[in-house]
Image (spheres, grey):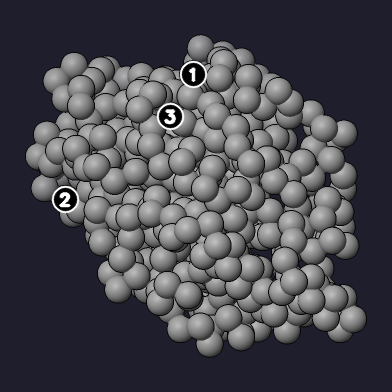
Amino acid sequence: MNQNTFKSKSQKTRLSILDVIYHSGKGHIGGAYSCTDILVALYYGGILKYDPKNPKWNQRDRFIISKGHAAIALYVILSDLGYFNKSELESFNNGGILGEHPDINIPGIEVNGGSLGHGLGIGSGMALAAKIDANNYRTFVLLGDGECNEGSVWEAAMFAAHHNLENLTAIVDRNGLCIHGTTEEINRLDPLDKKFESFGWHVETMDGHNIDEIVSKVKINHSGKPKVIIANTVKGKGVSFMENIASWHHGGISDELYEQAKTELISH
Amino acid sequence: MNSSNSNNVDMRDAFFNGLYQVIESDKNVMVLTADHGAFGLNIIKEDLPDQYLNMGIAEQNMASVAAGLALSGKIVYIYSIINFVTLRCLEQINIDIASMNLNINIVGVGAGFTYSTDGPTHHGTQDVAIMSVIPNLSIYNCSDAVNSNAFAKMGYENKGPKYIRIEKGLVPELYKQESLFEDGIAKVKNGNDTYILSSGIMIHKAIDAAKTLSKNDSEIGVLDLYRMKPINEILLVDFLSDVKKLLIIEDNICTGGLSEKVCSILMKNKMTLDMKILNVPDSFSFYYSQKREYVENQSGLSVAHIMEILTE
């Protein structure tokens, strides 16, 4: 897939997220947009091994969306890949199988989520199991940056490094915003890369909206250590009035703003 | 505690002996500890090191890692002192383990006032109430070496998440070696119309009191509710159908424990008994003693007090 096709996938994904949240009434659009390009890279960029016809294929790579509130971005992609019918998106948050947070009854979802700080520990367990059983699949965990305030993230970080889980890759969606302001104002994370490094991880940073860069950074890990990539992102990426505005973490979209967002996304 | 009939196997060792057999039989079984040891666990560590993992003092991560292992096909036991393996990682148990109905056994040592010198951080008096609100989770409470051993094996044989409270020390044997523990409740002493209902180590105080007070024409019976969730309601109601006077004793805090569970079942079944309850008051116990009885006595959990209530 070339850069233009990636761009088109990202654009279509963002438009679909907008439609779903607009029609459902409310949703976590800001954090869904900050990780959209990461998810597109993972699923369309040849990183993850998966089979939509056999979601439980035992050699699949495991992907945990630990920042579960951004699940809508993943649902749009999973439905595009054929894990479930696209019509399910129409009943998002309104009586169907898809809600705000992921659960394992949804094809393609590995772990129940919604509470922050759980994914890296579960992912560490999956990665350890793969090592014990000599399986080659990899485990990927998408963390929110605010989520890294949780102590359990660091318990898992310590454990994964101790056991040299090189088959575990974490990506931090570093959009810099929590619900009530910036991560640095609320409970400082920087230097986040140095923190992971000091825990024994192989650390890289990347532009979380440059899909070629994401693919090249995430695809391989020869470090012998668990790998984390700090993805510098923009909350609300793609829609000017949402970008870097904390209040777009969760909410509804007026008719007027919906049209404006749609126009902006199409013209990009 | 009267240990004259003890079978000379420590309850905790009995559990780990059972676990050893399970782990030895299937390489897919793993035991994780939050740096908490036991004689029997050390043997597993020595003999079967690939299936043993010391997670360090990180119970939340232990529960989450267990979930990741179980989602990858492993059967997992996680182990520490009761409060640390339940309260400390409650949300991980609730979401990562129970909500996904995983084959994980949460094993806590130190029910009630086992850790009698260590204060309320180590008292296992709130865990039953708290763990009882978690769907899918079964709760087993060991009362002798035989069921301690059996629960270790049932953790492997029965699917789904389980919480197993184990005890340290020697106690008289209540059950025959070949006993099955599928019913969830057992009559461990026959009686006429007065019964004591209890669970865990308190059973032995109940038996001591009942034996002392029993006369030929009016035996006091004792029921052991060793599976605290789900309670076998049908069998419990059946056992209590001819009982006129019931005393419930437990080393759990007064809210949400055995007594509230049983009261609720009795009310639902429109059963009115002359009932008394002895449990731990709504307080933290800052009493310290090498003698467990001393700390238990501060909460009224003594054989003498049980006898006093029964003769009121």
Q: Is residue A55 above or below residue A139?
A: below
Query: Are dots 1 and 2 on a single chain?
Result: no
Q: Are marks 1 and 3 in contact (CB under 8 Å)?
A: yes
Tell me the SS state at disc 1. Answer: loop
Rendering coords of residue B267 (x, y %): 58, 74
Q: Is residue B186 above or below residue B1?
A: below
Specify the subunit that label 1 lies on. Answer: A
Q: Is residue A268 above or below residue A47?
A: below
Q: Are marks 1 and 2 in contact (CB under 8 Å)?
A: no
* Mark drawn on residue A200: 1
Query: In the rendered structure, which amino acid carries the disc numbered 3?
Result: Pro
Residue at the (70%, 31%) spot, across then down: B284
Specify the subunit that label 2 lies on. Answer: B
Rendering coords of residue B281 (x, y %): 68, 40
Tell me the SS state at disc 3. Answer: loop
Query: In the rendered structure, which amino acid carries the disc numbered 2?
Result: Ser
* Mark drawn on residue A226: 3
Q: Which residue is mark 2?
A: B179
Left or right, residue A258 beside residue A106: right
